[in-house]
Image (cartoon, rainbow, N blue to C red):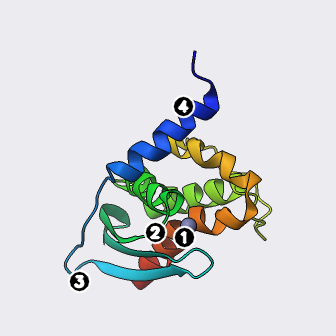
Amino acid sequence: MPGLEDLYREIILDHYRTPRNRGELPTPPASRADGHNPLCGDEITVFVQVDDGVVTDVKVSGQGCSISQSSASMMTQAVKGKSLDEVRALVRRFKGMMSIESDDDSPMPEVSLGDLEALQGVVKFPVRIKCATLAWNTLVEAVENA
Ligand code: ZN
């Protein structure tokens, strides 16, 4: 029987090989942000369409390592159709899983990470954490630009 680590590796590879919501959105009405992780060479552009406080569409383009690209693919799946409040909760929860300190000391929001759980093993490799969080930081920037 495959272990949890094998399952996680499969999920990451699946999103890397078959990225979801790949492409671009017209700006405007969508907004965009560019993210770069110089430590690894990862580049990600996030396009986000926000209508009445809801992320109605999101697309990602760019290139980089399997962690950065699969995290971006999972991120698009996780935030599409969510309200900005839900997106903020998800960002905080994901960064919490990545052991990133927050100055927000309110209780951690109870939101499901779904496939994103597969990235929790990345915490063991601190240099890769920036790969995993790149899409999320870029998403936050794109939403701020909206
Ligand atoms: Zn990387």
Where is residue 68? Give x, y as percent. 51, 63
Give the residue furthest to the left.
26
Between disc 1 and disc 2, the foreground one is 2
- As helix, strand or loop, the secondary structure at mark 3 comes to loop
Where is residue 129? Give x, y as percent. 66, 63
According to the image, label 2 marks what residue? 64
Q: Is residue 108 above or below residue 146?
A: above
Residue for point 32% across, 64% down: 58
According to the image, label 1 marks what residue? 134
Q: Quadrant of the N terminus?
A: top right
- The amino acid pointed to by label 4 is Leu
The quarter of the picture where residue 102 lies is bottom right
In depth, the one of 70 and 54 nearer the eye is: 70
Label whose residue precedes the other's in the sequence (1 or 2): 2
- The amino acid pointed to by label 1 is Leu
Q: Quadrant of ligand 1?
A: bottom right
- The amino acid pointed to by label 2 is Gly
